[in-house]
Amino acid sequence: MNVFSETHKIVNAIIPTAADTFTTGAGIVSDIVNMENYRKCTFIVATGAAAAAIQTVRVFAGVDNVVCATPITFKYRTQAAAGVPGIGSDVPTTLTDAGILGFPMISTIAGGMAIIEVDAAVVAAALAGADHCALTLVDTTLPLAQLGCVIAILSEPRYPQDILATAID
């Protein structure tokens, strides 16, 4: 039997608190995730509604849990056709390529979601010894605070016996 929690590592990358709002400027950076034992990292970005807020979503690679500063490409899909629980609110878009400048996630719909797919091969190709990644969210329109959270799901373990080892060092 295949149990999700035995084949995937789940990391609370950005905890939703009033202090962790996505605002204009530097934005907010997720915890740095160690992909050493995994081939894939999927970031789930879930937001509440905000007035005309657009977050630019980017992903960075690094060699340790201190600095992730090299921008990388990734794939993404959004899930924001309607406010939750409206019809179509759970329908994702097609998988799309994002360059190193990321993509704009429009978050005016209550319950908007973005699914960010990071491949360990892309992280490793970014710079020598890279096996860590992090996600940033920057409000690029107005300095409006918006509550949200990010969950990282590591999958395709390289060594299944190490699946439950820490991924945030």
Image (cartoon, rainbow, N blue to C red):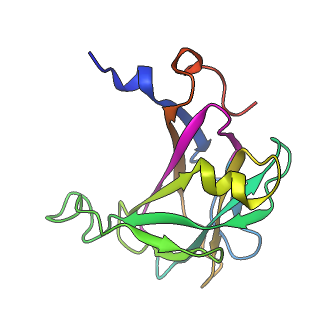
- Residue drawn at point x = 46 percent, y = 79 percent: 51
Q: Is residue 8 visible?
A: yes
**Residue 134: x %, y % from top left:** 68, 53
**Residue 109: x %, y % from top left:** 35, 71
- Residue drawn at point x = 43 percent, y = 20 percent: 6
Q: Is residue 20 visible?
A: no
Q: Looking at the image, which residue sits at the far left? A: 87
123 vs 159: above or below: below
**Residue 66: x %, y % from top left:** 86, 45
User: Left or right of 99: which side holds 47?
Assistant: left
In depth, the one of 28 and 120 nearer the eye is 120
**Residue 9: x %, y % from top left:** 52, 30
Residue 165 placement: quadrant: top right
56 vs 115: above or below: below
In depth, the one of 32 and 74 nearer the eye is 74
41 magenta-colored: yes
81 vs 134: above or below: below
86 magenta-colored: no
Span highlighted in magenta in the image: 31-49
User: Left or right of 59: which side holds 45?
Assistant: left
Residue 65 placement: quadrant: top right
